[in-house]
Image (spheres, rainbow, N blue to C red):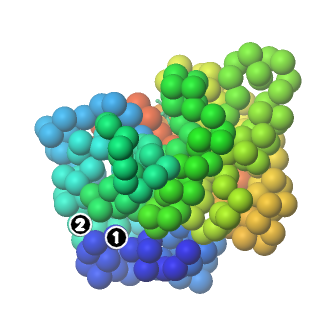
Amino acid sequence: MEAKRLRKPGFREARRFDKRLMHLGKGLVMAQGSAPRRLVAGNWKMNGLSRSLVEVRALKSALAARALSTTIAVCPPATLLHQVSLELKGTPILVGGQDCHPEATGPFTGDISAEMLADAGASLVILGHSERRHGLHESDELIARKVSGAQRAGLVSILCIGETEAERDGGRTLDVVGRQITYSLPQAMDAGALVIAYEPVWAIGTGRVPSNSDIESVHGFVRERLKKRFGGDGADIAILYGGSVKPSNAGEILKLKEVGGALVGGASLKATDFLQIIDAA
Ligand code: PEP
């Protein structure tokens, strides 16, 4: 992926905001001459009205006073995407969508394409979230087409993978996430346009989290799969953990091996909570 594709409006101003920011071809956003930066992304799901922009403003002003070593993204509902991206113009905070249609345009009433997300100011998109895989029966094949569409539009995909409780109890976690990595990615995939989020379905919104050793073992397995698929580039793909990340547990989770950040649902809705998670990263 070309560096320019990852740039968001106001990049020059963003460099003044945090001079260490550099958008590179490989990896999402890297600090100059150092390891890939961590990514903490907030998934607002179907929450947020215009008045929620106060949370974005609070986040922006709190982060303006900090030297950021973590990449931050906010993924509001599509109705707020443009407003949020205008609000964050000139800052290094990225904006993402929560889903996209595989095609760029066409007779798909109610759908939104990756190009439309990009046009509204997004540089990322969450794909394959369990609320869509399980709630809306999205298949791996459909998700792969969406990832392909995101790549075509120059968006980085945050591909969500994770097992249900029954799959975990049946000892099938690694089979499930392995299958999702294999089949939810298109044949032509640029490692630089990909972030993985391991989100056990039973941990999302429940307050339950896997043990530290379970998180490390799944993330280690995912890393091996990515290296097998992408060679050396697979080592640079950020693997986020998601599922009931809160200010109280973020520090511990984000220290674990191969955890390159977090995808945060409920706790991203209030700037005060989200900031504590960012600080933990
Ligand atoms: C999510 O929706 O991706 C998520 C991880 O939700 P929560 O943090 O609320 O469990």
Task: Tell me how far mark 2 sits from mark 1, CA to CA.
Answer: 8 Å
Instruction: Give the position of the N terminus as an image quadrant.
Output: bottom right
Up/down of 65 relative to 144, above or below: below
Q: Nearer the viewer, residue 160 or 220?
A: 160
Give the label, 2 or 1, closer to the camera.
1
Residue 229: percent from left, percent from top: 80, 61
Q: Which mark is residue 149?
A: none
Label 2 packing within 10 angstroms: few (<14), some (14-19), many (20+): some
Up/down of 186 relative to 108, above or below: below
Residue 217: percent from left, percent from top: 81, 41
Name the residue at 48% across, 34% down. Answer: 246
Relative to residue 12, is residue 123 drawn left or right? right
Name the residue at 27% across, 58% down. Answer: 120
Label 1 packing within 10 angstroms: few (<14), some (14-19), many (20+): many
Disc 2 on helix, strand or loop? loop
Residue 152: percent from left, percent from top: 50, 65
Residue 167: percent from left, percent from top: 77, 21
Q: Nearer the viewer, residue 107 or 62?
A: 107
**Residue at which label 2 appears:** 89
Relative to residue 82, is residue 222 drawn left or right? right
Q: Amino acid at mark 2?
A: Lys
Q: Amino acid at mark 1?
A: Lys
Rendering quarter of residue 168:
top right
**Residue at which label 1 appears:** 8
Q: Is residue 230 visible?
A: yes
Name the residue at 41% across, 31% down. Answer: 266
Relative to residue 242, is residue 5 drawn left or right? left
Q: Is residue 75 visible?
A: no
Disc 1 on helix, strand or loop? loop
Q: Are marks 2 and 1 in contact (CB under 8 Å)?
A: yes
Name the residue at 71% across, 59% down. Answer: 187
